[in-house]
Image (spheres, rainbow, N blue to C red):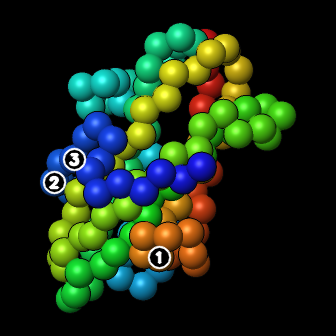
Amino acid sequence: MLRPALVFSFLIATFCIFGTVYATSGDLTLSLPTTVDMSGHQKSEIIAGEPVGFSSIITNHGTTEKRFTYVVLMLNQAKQIELQEGLSASIGSSQSFTVAQSWTPKESGTYTVQTVLLNGYLLSSRITDVIETKITVK
């Protein structure tokens, strides 16, 4: 179940990324998620039983504040949901910040991470396309 929150899960930071793939629609963009450790540093290897974070950058290119819900889905090889989490917030005009969601894989395998921005604080229409990223857990 989607759990709206006004406070982010574990990481909020302001920064820019160059050369990153984004999902966009209107004034908001969502970057391709990267895997990070619990300190926010990029993580190249994902091990079963160890927590990992999925970090994305949300940018408001518009001139007004925007409300959104950031959603992360983790699907196993059978396309069953392993994780479904979300957070809701507002972002000011011309601002960027990083959001992240943590997950601890129980077993090795190939998983699909899906990230998307929804309009407002309740389940509603998508602001961005769904970004799908395959990951391998050892």
Three-letter code, disc 1:
Asn
Where in the figure is residue 10, as x and y percent of width and height? 29, 37
96 vs 24: above or below: above
Q: Residues within 10 Å of mark 3 (few under 14, many from 20)?
A: some
Residue at image mark 3: 12
From mark 1 to mark 2, how far is it between C-alphas? 21 Å
Quarter-of-image position of residue 54: top left
Residue at image mark 2: 14
Residue depicted at x 66% and y 33%: 82
Nearest to the observer: residue 124 or residue 132:
124
- Residue 80 appears anywhere in the view: yes
Left or right: where 36 falls relative to 86: left
Q: Which mark is residue 119?
A: 1
- Residue 128 appears anywhere in the view: no
71 vs 91: above or below: above
Q: Residues within 10 Å of mark 2 (few under 14, many from 20)?
A: few
Residue depicted at x 60% and y 37%: 83
**Residues at discs 1 and 3 in contact (Cβ within 8 Å):** no
From mark 3 to mark 2, how far is it between C-alphas? 7 Å
Three-letter code, disc 2:
Thr
Mark found first going from the N terminus, 1 or 2: 2
Q: Residues within 10 Å of mark 1 (few under 14, many from 20)?
A: some
Quarter-of-image position of residue 130: bottom right
Element on which disc 2 rests: loop
The C terminus is located in which quarter? top right
Left or right: where 132 falls relative to 29: right
Quarter-of-image position of residue 96: bottom left
